[in-house]
Amino acid sequence: QVQLVESGGGLVQTGGSLRLSCAASGFSFSSYRMGWFRQAPGKEREFVSRISWNGGRTFYADSVKGRFIISRDNAKNTVTLQMNSLRPEDTAVYFCAVARAGTTGVLPDEYDYWGPGTQVAVSS
């Protein structure tokens, strides 16, 4: 079955960096777009970034553009989110997910499979 496991979260000070990874299994990873979302307490899940099947195209939410970088390694079935210049408002649980074909890839309901998430906390 499809399995996604995020790792790399933690506590970091404002301006610091974290590198999140998502290990995927149980499906043809290299055939699917992948995305990262986040959810802060009391807020809805929001889009962060997505990447095309071969890594050639990426897209970011305005709130993270220029600070976060998404990448993938199809040989290792992993997708990574490098987060730089972190801010307190980046504090959230971060999820990786598998995008459904033919969608925009920016809405949570366009994703079929999700990992359990990893907590990121940025202190001021």
Image (spheres, rainbow, N blue to C red):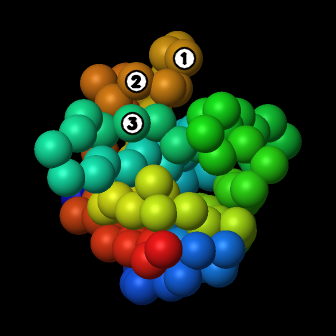
Residue visible at 54% across and 82% down in the picture: 13
Give the residue at mark 1.
Answer: 104
Residue 112 percent coordinates (x, y): 30, 36
- Give above or below for 65 relative to 10: above
Could you tell me the amino acid type at mark 3?
Glu
Do labels 2 and 3 touch, CB within 8 Å? no
Secondary structure of the residue carrying tag 3 is: strand
- Give above or below for 68 relative to 61: below
- The quadrant in which residue 96 appears is bottom left
Give the residue at mark 3.
Answer: 46
Residue visible at 51% across and 26% down in the picture: 105
Q: Earlier in the sequence, mark 1 or mark 3?
A: 3
| Viewer-nearest of discs 1 and 3 | 3
Tell me: 36 left or right of 31.
left
Residue visible at 28% across and 51% down in the picture: 40
Residue 107 tag number:
2
